[in-house]
Image (cartoon, coloured by chain):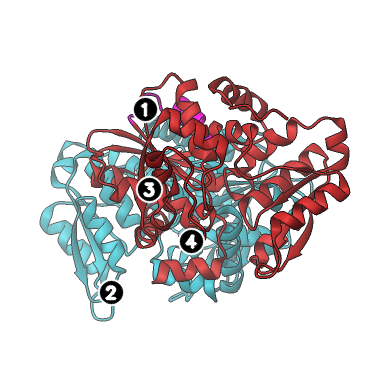
Chain colours: A cyan, B red
Amino acid sequence: MSLSLPTPADVLAAAQLLKGVVHHTPVLRSTTIDRLFGGELYFKCENLQRTGSFKFRGAYCALAQFDARQRDKGVLAYSSGNHAQAIALAARQHDIPALIVMPDDAALTKLEATRGYGAQVVTYQRGTEDRNTISQRLAAERGMSIVPPSDHPQIIAGHGTAALELLQEVPKLDYLFVPTGGGALLAGSLLAVQAAGSGCEVFGVEPEAADHARQSLKAGHIVTIAHPRTIADAAQSPALAPLAFEIIRKAAPQLLAASDAQMLQALRFLAQRMKLVVEPTGALAFAGARDGGVALHGKRVGIIVSGGNVDLSRYARFISD
Amino acid sequence: MSLSLPTPADVLAAAQLLKGVVHHTPVLRSTTIDRLFGGELYFKCENLQRTGSFKFRGAYCALAQFDARQRDKGVLAYSSGNHAQAIALAARQHDIPALIVMPDDAALTKLEATRGYGAQVVTYQRGTEDRNTISQRLAAERGMSIVPPSDHPQIIAGHGTAALELLQEVPKLDYLFVPTGGGALLAGSLLAVQAAGSGCEVFGVEPEAADHARQSLKAGHIVTIAHPRTIADAAQSPALAPLAFEIIRKAAPQLLAASDAQMLQALRFLAQRMKLVVEPTGALAFAGARDGGVALHGKRVGIIVSGGNVDLSRYARFISD
């Protein structure tokens, strides 16, 4: 597995690979929202992607690179969320055994979904055990290959295909807002903009409490925020992945931050006006577009709605607050 | 305005008229749902239609038939729900004045949405005043044309375009499940199946407490249920519209009924698995498909998700029960 930086050509190759495998998710619009903002807003609905988030794109691409031995031994991933489900389904489709290391307090629906896709799940105690140590040990014992959620060229290239689809469907986008955690989606989207030959300006949007990308670009090196606390659980990673950082540093997109309250407002707006169930991170890019101080008037604006995996009881609280 | 029965050709003509006007709504699928049912389920997402329901289709077609005098004087509609918003937006697009008669206890979001589309709203007291009397009086005073929610050939033909789009996108459907209240959507869908030359079997699904279509087909005449009580507020009409009844009687589709509890289960399922916000009536067809005793194994099954207009606080209760 190459650890060189992925390129725009890799995003185009990933798009070929994913044809007929991923849902070509719909791009939705709302006249009412356009009137409110005075621009044209295009929502790329990756909450409607298989496994409920864009993560399936990169996961499938990463496993497609496995050689015969790797395929035989299987894949290991550690994740409490969308990456787990994505690897589980991708592994089933590639006919590769999958072992997912999840905290024992992970949402029951996520445990069930991951098992439902045919993966074996090993749980650990979040407080007393270290998932990296457990994962490394299990991978070594079983000869399995670990696929990390962000720091992987094929993950980045695969994730970039969501933005590529949007850019191909809606030419002449002025702005693209991308939710940002470990940075693979943002990095892939930046490559996609280059691949599409688009002059589109990209904005990465981070949770306010996890704005390490903004800090990292400023510092010129990767800044870590040990335990960021935000409702955006899918963008809660402590730092950018090194590969993603390299791409983001070179492309130097603008970075915005959204508070939990702004995400909740955006989440409710998407429910009320767009009839979409999104998880908090799924509303992150829209929150940045709404409240980030960027003038949208007269602009064609793409927004990546990244995922919709949220327990209904938690979601009910979000929309009734 | 002709009151003759609409034909399959009228649905095809309506589809031409609506090109570029309505959203060509996405047809969504879920591998998990397909595995559960052993068939291929295709969800036609009219909750993602403009104004949040399929009603905009027929409303636009009905107003397109107005002559110069009618256009000048305007349209009047009485509705507490989706028809109100549909007529309001269609009128704005046709540049026709619109007056909507709504109960004063209608949901604030619906009043606001209707006004937001530029319509004038007149409210009445549901207990003490009769909306028909008020509407007739206002229409006479102002020379306005009343467009009813169901009993209108262009409404029926326009509504049929949702099923037509589905049948054209997914050929060889075996079954099509359609939510049924006043009957215009079911009648239009039956015409669409004929227009598409499809052998698809159509199932109308009614709320258990408002199963007047089933009773009417059995009796051979229109049966009225005075005040049906169901959470499916958009399918709460007391009887089939006469034009719809004629079409439904001739085509003789199978009719199923779903309880409120079954609708709620289907609504939650659509939130959890499909990431879609739907109103109770929007889950009615899927409830019929799930629980109506029809074997879906090995079948290609279309399901019309009719709408998503529901107050978030009410929706939060539905998904947290």
- The subunit carrying tag 2 is A
Any part of residue A164 in sight:
no
**Is disc 2 on the same chain as disc 3?**
no
Residues at marks 1 and 2, CA–CA distance in whole angstroms: 47 Å
Mark 3 highlights which residue? Answer: B286
Residues at marks 1 and 3, CA–CA distance in whole angstroms: 17 Å
| Crowd band around label 2 with a 10 angstrom C-alpha radius: few (<14), some (14–19), many (20+) | few
Query: Which disc number belongs to residue A181?
Result: 4
- The subunit carrying tag 3 is B
Mark 2 highlights which residue? Answer: A105
Q: Amino acid at mark 3?
A: Phe
- Which comes before the other along the chain, label 4 or label 2? 2
- The subunit carrying tag 4 is A
B144 relative to A168 in the view: left or right = right
- Nearer the observer: mark 1 or 2; the answer is 1
Q: Amino acid at mark 1?
A: Cys
User: Which quadrant is the N terminus of chain A positioned in?
Assistant: top left
Q: Amino acid at mark 4?
A: Gly
Q: How many marks?
A: 4
Tell me which corner region of the image, top left, top right, bottom left or bottom right, holds residue A16: top left
Q: Are marks 3 and 2 in contact (CB under 8 Å)?
A: no
Q: Amino acid at mark 2?
A: Asp
Q: Is residue A242 above or below residue B151?
A: below
Q: Secondary structure at mark 1?
A: loop
Residues at marks 4 and 3, CA–CA distance in whole angstroms: 36 Å
The percent position of residue B266, horizontal first and vertical second, equals 37, 55
| Crowd band around label 3 with a 10 angstrom C-alpha radius: few (<14), some (14–19), many (20+) | many
Mark 1 highlights which residue? Answer: B200
Of residues B114 and B276, the one nearer the viewer is: B114
The span shown in magenta is B162-174
Magenta stretch, main secondary structure, is helix
Of residues A284 and B63, the one nearer the viewer is: B63
